[in-house]
């Protein structure tokens, strides 16, 4: 049950963030907005890591683990966030967020391909529904113009 509440809190914070980011992007270019966001997170995370003593575990990680996490961070926190901020600058959170939130489809496809995870009927149906949802959002202005 704890996992559910943590997931619900993540959804809440992830839902609030794009609205605040869109406000911040009114006057700031995406690269500047992302830099401000990343620096503030890095400073706070550094303080928390040092204060909690978790820095000891950081220095014990093997090179492969660090490399994989660095590449993941570059994909997600740098490149992914930068193109996401460009999308938010140009579009609305109500359109951009659902489309960007289809990333689990990419993760699922890669998991099937790289880890041999089974593609169950439930996962396949869910993927089709996600794709249909994104198509509905994309066709919203075409099919139901104001």
Image: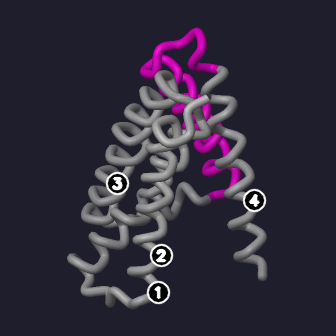
CA separation, marks 4 and 1? 25 Å
Task: State the mark number for residue 9.
Answer: 4
Q: For the residues labelled 4 and 1, say whether their Cβ atoms are less than 8 Å apart.
A: no
Q: For the residues labelled 1 and 2, say whether their Cβ atoms are less than 8 Å apart.
A: yes
User: Which residue is depicted at the point 61% across and 44% down?
Assistant: 45
CA separation, marks 1 and 2? 6 Å
- The residue closer to the viewer here, 41 or 101, is 101
Residue 12 to residue 82: above or below? below
User: Which residue is depicted at the point 74% across and 52% down?
Assistant: 12
Crowd around label 1: few <14 · some 14–19 · many ≥20 (10 Å)? few
The tag earlier along the polypeptide, 3 or 2, is 3
The tag earlier along the polypeptide, 4 or 1, is 4
CA separation, marks 4 and 2? 23 Å
Crowd around label 2: few <14 · some 14–19 · many ≥20 (10 Å)? few
Task: State the mark number for residue 72.
Answer: 3
Q: Which residue is mark 2?
A: 126
Q: Secondary structure at mark 2?
A: helix
4 or 1: mark nearer the eye: 1
Q: Which residue is mark 1?
A: 122
CA separation, marks 3 and 1? 28 Å
Residue furthest top as drawn: 27
CA separation, marks 4 and 3? 23 Å
Residue range corresponding to the magenta coloring: 24-53
The image quadrant where one finds the N terminus is bottom right
Q: For the residues labelled 4 and 3, say whether their Cβ atoms are less than 8 Å apart.
A: no
3 or 2: mark nearer the eye: 2
- The residue closer to the viewer here, 121 or 39, is 121
Residue 30 to residue 44: above or below? above
Q: For the residues labelled 3 and 1, say whether their Cβ atoms are less than 8 Å apart.
A: no
């Amino acid at each position: 049950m704890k996992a559910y509440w943590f997931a619900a809190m993540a959804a809440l914070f992830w839902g609030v963030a794009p609205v605040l980011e869109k406000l911040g992007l009114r006057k700031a270019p995406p690269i500047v907005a992302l830099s401000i966001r990343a620096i503030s997170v890095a400073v706070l995370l550094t303080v928390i890591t040092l204060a909690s003593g978790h820095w000891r575990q950081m220095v014990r990680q093997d090179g492969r683990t660090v490399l994989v996490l660095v590449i993941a961070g570059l994909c997600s926190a740098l490149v992914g966030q930068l193109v996401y901020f460009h999308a938010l600058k140009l579009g609305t959170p109500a359109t951009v967020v659902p489309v960007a939130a289809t990333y689990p489809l990419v993760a699922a496809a890669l998991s099937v391909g790289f880890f041999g995870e089974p593609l169950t009927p439930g996962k396949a149906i869910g993927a089709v529904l996600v794709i249909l949802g994104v198509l509905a959002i994309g066709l919203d202005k075409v099919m139901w113009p104001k």
